[in-house]
């Protein structure tokens, strides 16, 4: 019987390590999701009161509001980051600070 317990302990350790690796890879999105959920919680409570206690409807409306605000912001940030990356790459290829400034102004 001791042999089965050792196998279970190893299985638990391996599964725990795998869960830790997955959590380590996803820590930033998880923290961001928790932060957004905490930030919009007052909105959910207000909408729930306004909708006569219908929490599911208030939650669904809150998700739509977060998406309506978040998707354009994330899209704009991604476009801006790509443009900044292109400007930096062009500036690095220019060779001189003057050439880099000319490339930035020209684009």
Image: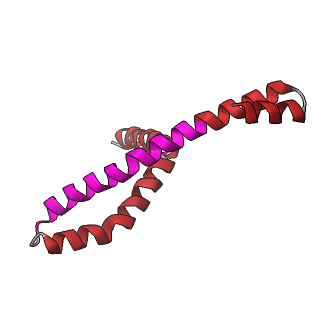
Left or right: 60 as drawn, with respect to 1: left
Q: Position of residue 59 (x, y in %)?
A: 21, 59
Which residue extends farthest front? Answer: 106
Which residue extends farthest top? Answer: 93
Scheme of image coloration: secondary structure
What residue lies at 46% left-to-right and 54% top-to-bottom? Answer: 32
Quarter of the image with the N terminus is: top left
Magenta stretch: dominant secondary structure = helix
Residue nearer the viewer, 48 or 85: 85
Query: Is there any visible trace of residue 13 in the rendered image?
Result: no
What residue lies at 57% left-to-right and 40% top-to-bottom? Answer: 80
Q: Is residue 18 above or below residue 93?
A: below
Left or right: 88 as drawn, with respect to 59: right
**Residue 6 in which image quadrant:** top left
What residue lies at 20% left-to-right and 69% top-to-bottom? Answer: 47
Residue nearer the viewer, 14 or 43: 43
Residue nearer the viewer, 57 or 82: 82
Quarter of the image with the C terminus is: top right
Tell me if residue 69 is in the magenta stretch.
yes
Residue nearer the viewer, 13 or 20: 20
Q: Is residue 44 above or below residue 14?
A: below
Q: Position of residue 106 (x, y in %)?
A: 73, 31
What residue span does the magenta drawing correspond to? 54-81
Tell me if residue 53 is in the magenta stretch.
no
Q: Position of residue 66 (x, y in %)?
A: 33, 54
Q: Position of residue 49 (x, y in %)?
A: 16, 75
**Residue 52 in which image quadrant:** bottom left
């Amino acid at each position: 019987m001791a042999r089965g317990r050792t196998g279970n302990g190893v299985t638990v350790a391996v599964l725990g390590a795998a869960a830790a690796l997955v959590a380590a890879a996803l820590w930033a999105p998880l923290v961001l999701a928790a932060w957004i959920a905490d930030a919009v919680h007052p909105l959910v409570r207000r909408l729930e009161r306004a909708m006569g206690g219908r929490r599911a409807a208030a939650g669904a409306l809150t998700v739509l509001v977060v998406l309506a605000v978040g998707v354009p912001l994330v899209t704009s940030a991604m476009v801006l980051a790509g443009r900044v990356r292109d400007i930096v790459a062009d500036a690095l290829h220019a060779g001189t600070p003057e050439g880099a400034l000319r490339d930035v102004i020209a684009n």
